């Protein structure tokens, strides 16, 4: 592997954009991911559902190496990201993440939160970075709050700013780790609405969520995880209307009649 930091800047790769095979992750003696394999194609919205503790968030964090897998393979654009020479920061530019806790800079206003990564990491011209930030704040409905301090906006607004910040880095994939779990119920809809629009526009997304209506209505592919394994994978219609596995049916029984 060359130590070329533009290693991920290739457009002629063939799908899948992400390929995971036999992924395992241990924390000391606890096996959290036991044998996880799946693929994501460009433009797909893949939603991962399952009970708390099933390994969903750990798996997501492995994809951009916030956690390093114990074994297995993760390929992004056909490149093995577990290669020791992979530039991790460059990977995270291409595979962005939106966290449940927002992770915004409280000492900066809304607009600066969406500019700083572009100028510091991507080395974009400040004027170009500002234009891109303003475009994305408009997209998520936060342009009228661009000069507000982070402490002056609601949780739902913070999450929309976090999405605008991720978009401003021009990623190939965005990972969403339970993006609505820290929000009051009335704020959930505004964030899910933004995510639905991104899915319609063809943004490649992997979403860990407990929002079953979003999974049913928006996902191209639904993955049900339990106890560190993928129990079942299918279209939203297949998973929600005719799940094959008893454990899937049991999990969904509280959401579907």
Image (cartoon, rainbow, N blue to C red):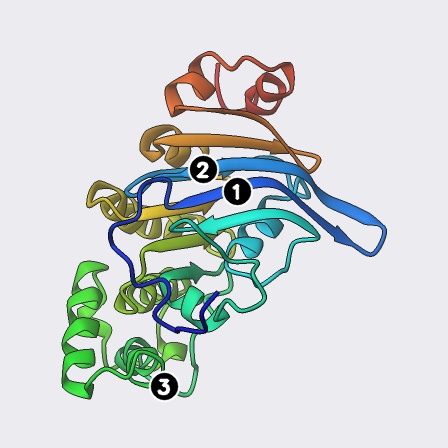
Residue receiving disc 3: 108
Distance from label 3 to label 1 (Cα)?
A: 37 Å
Which numbered disc, 3 or 1, marks the residue that appears first in the sequence? 1
Q: Is residue 181 above or below residue 136?
A: above
Q: Could you tell me how many numbered marks the image carries?
A: 3
Left or right: where does residue 167 sit relative to residue 16?
A: left
Which residue is at the front of the view, 174 or 162?
174
Discs 3/1, front = 1
- Circles 2 and 3 in contact, beta carbons < 8 Å: no
Q: Is residue 145 above or below residue 12?
A: below
- Circles 2 and 1 in contact, beta carbons < 8 Å: yes
Quarter assignment of residue 211: top left
Discs 2/3, front = 2
Q: Is residue 73 above or below residue 142?
A: above
- Point 36% across, 53% down: residue: 173
Residue receiving disc 2: 39
Residue receiving disc 1: 20
- Point 20% across, 79% down: residue: 129
- Point 37% across, 46% down: residue: 17
Distance from label 2 to label 1 (Cα)?
A: 6 Å
Q: Which x, y percent locates residue 204?
A: 32, 47
Which numbered disc, 2 or 1, marks the residue that appears first in the sequence? 1
Q: Which x, y percent locates residue 70?
A: 71, 53
Query: Few, some or many C-alpha atoms within 10 Å of disc 1 (few <14, some 14-19, many ≥20)?
Result: many
Which numbered disc, 2 or 3, marks the residue that appears first in the sequence? 2
Which residue is at the front of the view, 132 or 13?
13
Q: Secondary structure at mark 1?
A: strand
């Amino acid at each position: 592997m060359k130590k070329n930091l533009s290693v991920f800047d290739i457009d002629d790769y063939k799908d899948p954009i992400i390929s995971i095979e036999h992924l395992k992750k241990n924390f000391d003696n606890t096996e959290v991911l036991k044998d996880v394999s799946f693929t994501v194609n460009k433009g797909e919205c893949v939603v991962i559902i399952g009970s708390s503790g099933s390994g969903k968030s750990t798996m997501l964090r492995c994809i951009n190496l916030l956690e390093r897998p114990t074994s297995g393979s993760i390929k992004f654009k056909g490149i093995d990201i577990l290669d020791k020479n992979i530039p991790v920061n460059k990977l995270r530019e291409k595979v962005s993440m939106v966290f449940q806790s927002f992770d915004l800079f409280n000492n900066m206003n809304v607009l600066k939160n969406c500019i700083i990564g572009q100028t510091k990491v991507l080395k974009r011209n400040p004027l170009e970075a500002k234009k891109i930030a303003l475009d994305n704040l408009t997209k998520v409905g936060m342009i009228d709050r661009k000069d507000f301090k982070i402490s002056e906006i609601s949780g739902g607004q913070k999450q929309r700013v976090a999405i605008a910040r991720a978009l401003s880095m021009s990623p190939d994939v965005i990972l969403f780790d339970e993006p609505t779990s820290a929000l009051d119920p009335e704020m959930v809809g505004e964030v899910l609405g933004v995510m639905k629009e991104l899915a319609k526009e063809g943004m490649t997304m992997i979403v860990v969520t407990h929002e079953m209506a979003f999974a049913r209505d928006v996902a191209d592919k639904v993955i049900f995880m339990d106890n560190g394994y993928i129990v079942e994978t299918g279209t939203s219609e297949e998973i929600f209307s005719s799940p094959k596995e008893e454990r899937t049916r049991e999990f969904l029984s509280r959401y579907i009649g």
